Amino acid sequence: TNTPRILDGVAIAAEIKAEVAGEVKELAVRGITPGLAVILVGEVPASQIYVRSKVKTCGELGIYSEMLTPPESITTEEMLALVADLNAREDIDGILIQLPLPRHVDTKRLLEAVSPDKDVDGFHPVNVGRLQSGQPGLAPCTPAGIIEILKRSNLPIAGQNAVVVGRSDIVGKPAAMMLLNASATVTVCHSKTKDLARFTREADLLVAAIGRPGFVTADMVKPGATLIDVGINRVTDAAEVEGFFPGDAARAATFAKRSSVVVGDIHPAAFAVSGAYTPVPGGVGALTIAMLMKNTVTAAKLRRGLSTEK
Ligand code: NDP
């Protein structure tokens, strides 16, 4: 029987955070404390949870952090003024605008107003360009986390047939670009792709960033392939949960307690035929905050002309 390797995102995240804490200590010797400002608009419960854990992790690693919490009613102009302020501050290295923003705020304009050198989310067009042309810069956290998982698990990228399903600006596109930069042969698929399975079955390395529970099934993957599951989907239907995890008592207990379980974009039956896979939860998602911390330290170094090489 096949025993796939489980790529433990929680353990890899702990490793990265420990390294970041070490870098923060080295910077402290030079009198530098990296600083992150997080702007959280209004009262979106999920966003509040994310922001709180980002701020908490900063504290654990010795990074200064500041939370700005303007009311829901803030205008685009007022937000732009906040960002301009943070851009100019010497003690702030990273600026993160927690999305989604209220509908009346011009998100695109705001993301472009963040100084590219403080853009720890890596969403600014200048950083998108830097990633594309292989220049040092700040890259989006989730796809950067995928590369960290592969490298730290000693899984090959160069020369592999990598297929990315999903082409969002946040995950799919930057993931494809990073895999290409690491010399994979990259195919990007999306909702208009004809005969998707024809592509996914050829993948040595399959990245699913779709947003549909269990979309990639066992018949769509090459046996022994590495499967990277970015999806975070909440399933609230008992029969559907049982279909994902037949006879799984632990999952059933979670469902009984919370009336939902989180599943990825890849069906567990596909994991079973893989060579290695990232679980959901505890895979790619577990790295996002660690990568944000790493980006904050990178921003602090780049801005001062310090080397980011280890
Ligand atoms: P988007 O909705 O922005 O993008 C989804 C992509 O999947 C689109 O490119 C879409 O194609 C493609 N797609 C949708 N349906 C199909 C289909 N039937 N066949 C082929 N392709 C399809 O999502 P995100 O990229 O933001 O996120 C993807 C998933 O990753 C979500 O579950 C999200 O929750 C999760 N996520 C996890 C993160 C983490 O781990 N920290 C961070 C960010 C996201 P098209 O472009 O043609 O519409």
Image (spheres, grey):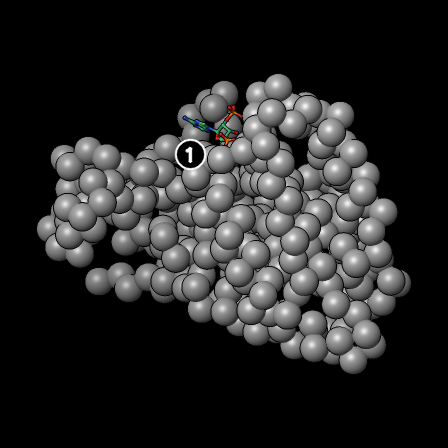
At x 57%, y 74%, the residue is 18
Residue 301's spot in the image, x, y percent? 80, 63
Q: Classify residue 164 as left or right of residue 36.
A: left
Is residue 182 at all visible to an observer of this figure? no
User: Where residue 39 sits in the image (x, y, percent)?
Assistant: 63, 42
**Crowd tier of the residue under label 1, counting other residues whose Cα lies within 10 Å: few below 14, some 14–19, many 20 or above:** some
- Residue at point 45% right, 47% down? 49
So how many labels did they put on this image?
A: 1
Expressed as whole percent of the image width and height from the top left, the position of residue 133 reads 79, 45
Amino acid beneath label 1: Gly
Q: Quarter-wise, where is residue 113 in the image?
A: top right
Q: Is mark 1 within 8 Å of ligand 1?
A: yes
**Residue at (64, 70) in percent of width and height:** 62
Q: Quadrant of residue 158?
A: bottom right
Is the residue 100 above or below the residue 310 in the image?
A: above
Looking at the rendered structure, the secondary structure element under dot 1 is loop
Residue under the image location 76 percent in, 74 percent down: 27
Query: Residue 55 location in percent, x, y?
Result: 57, 56
Relative to 64, 54 lies left or right: left
User: Which is nearer the eye, 295 or 101?
Assistant: 101
In this rendering, the answer to whether 51 lies above or below 192 is below
Q: Residue furthest right?
A: 305
Does residue 63 sit above or below 181 in this rendering?
below
Q: Quadrant of the C terminus?
A: bottom right
Q: Nearer the viewer, residue 225 or 69?
A: 69
Badge 1 is on which residue? 211
Depth order, front residue of 252/66: 66
| Image quadrant where one finds the N terminus | bottom left
> Would you say residue 11 is visible in this rendering?
yes
